[in-house]
Amino acid sequence: MCDLNKTGQGQVVCFMWHEGQGRRGSNEIGSCLLKYLEYKASAQENVEVVFYSDNCAGQQKNKFILAAYFYALSKYNIKSITHKYLITGHTQNEGDNVHSVIEKHVKRALKSGPIYTPDQYVSLVQTAKKTGLPYKVQEMSYADFVDLKKLSEQTSFNFKKDSSGEVVKLANAAIIRIEKENLDKFLYKTSYSEPEYRVVEIKQRTTRTNQTFDNVKLEPAYRDILPISKKKYDGLMFLLRMNTIKKCYSPFYNSLKNIFCMNSPVESCQCSLYGNDSEKYAGCGRPREQLTNGFLARKKEFPACVLAPHKNNSKQKSSVVSTTLKVYVHTELYGDMILCGTESRSFLE
């Protein structure tokens, strides 16, 4: 987020997280907005906030972000929030300039060596600005993201038509304004040229479970770190085994979870194949002691092995570790495979 003042660009705050901590939807964007608004309210009383952004409906142009604004106005010392959506095709702004500065700095850093972990990106963002105020970085974890969809449900936040009887379509909104003094409505325009705001009344269903924005409690969006895709996880583990990713960075990668093992039975889990056996938890989050009958245990069952060539139509480098009872195959294309008799089962599809 980039502050704007009379002299131009002010303080820039970059919210950063990797896909194991959160996604890129309205919950994540709204959580960042709430943190930013809380900071602004603590620094200045009765502040009037104006946001400028593009028209991405899945991130910041939906009723969940509106619910977050109503919550912020109820909780924080903010007078009003106005969100202006730039015209499609003309959305370039100061935020794009920040991204450009960071991208150039990252490219210069890559000339001296690879970037292995998100923490290194954080340091690069903090040092990207050479003049003026340095960029601030707010690192986010899964515990920092709140469930705005749940917030909308708990407060029965709903609307359909404006005061003139027209159906409200947020996708067509150009400006949205919410005022602390009128938290039962919001104002919007579908064009910058409209002389007056349209008024939308907020309708709340009366039930026993209804809560107001004053007393509602924000629920976490996630209870634990998020699993990444199996294909990506396997690729990262392959780079670790090949020492392309240095071993000193393995604690970060071994802390990741993958979707395959999260949804598979313990006996087929292969997370114990990776990382340090002395670690308490495997990549899927299960205790390693539960995986003693898994892939690694079966591999240790037959320690005597012979290296032999393996024909591969994919023209990829490959090697075979064979025993009298089982054959363990590793290929760059398919990863680790275990062949039992005439049956072949790929653990890394």
Image: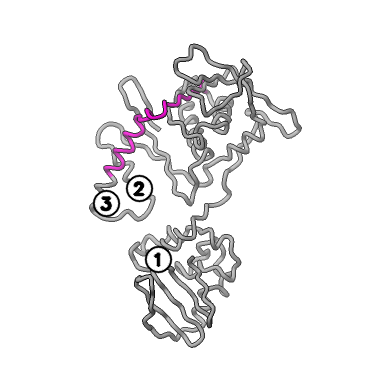
Relative to the observer, which residue lies in front, 185 or 7?
Answer: 185
Which residue range is magenta in the image? 78-105
Furthest residue toward front: 313
Q: Which mark is residue 121?
A: 2
Mark 3 or mark 1, which is nearer the start of the sequence?
A: 3
Q: Give the residue pinned by disc 3.
A: 110
Expressed as whole percent of the image width and height from the top left, the position of residue 186 reads 57, 21
Q: Residue at x 46, y 78 (%)?
A: 328
Q: Which mark is residue 238?
A: 1
- What quarter of the picture does the N terminus occupy? top left
Q: Which amino acid type is marked by label 1? A: Phe
Q: Residue at x 38, y 68 (%)?
A: 332
- Compared to residue 342, the image places residue 141 above or below, namely above
Furthest residue toward right: 208
Q: Which amino acid type is marked by label 2? A: Tyr
Q: Secondary structure at mark 2?
A: helix
Q: Residue at x 39, y 50 (%)?
A: 118
- In front: mark 2 or mark 1? 1
- Compared to residue 138, the image places residue 298 above or below, namely below
Q: Which amino acid type is marked by label 3? A: Leu
- Compared to residue 45, the image places residue 220 above or below, namely below
In magenta segment, residue 80:
yes
**Label 2: few (<14), some or many (≥20) within 10 Å?**
some
Disc 2 and disc 1 in contact, CB within 8 angstroms: no
C-alpha gap between disc 1 and disc 3: 22 Å
Expressed as whole percent of the image width and height from the top left, the position of residue 202 reads 64, 23
Relative to the observer, which residue lies in front, 235 or 340?
Answer: 340
C-alpha gap between disc 2 and disc 1: 22 Å
Expressed as whole percent of the image width and height from the top left, the position of residue 84 reads 45, 24
Mark 1 or mark 2, which is nearer the start of the sequence?
A: 2
Q: Residue 292: name its quadrant.
A: bottom right
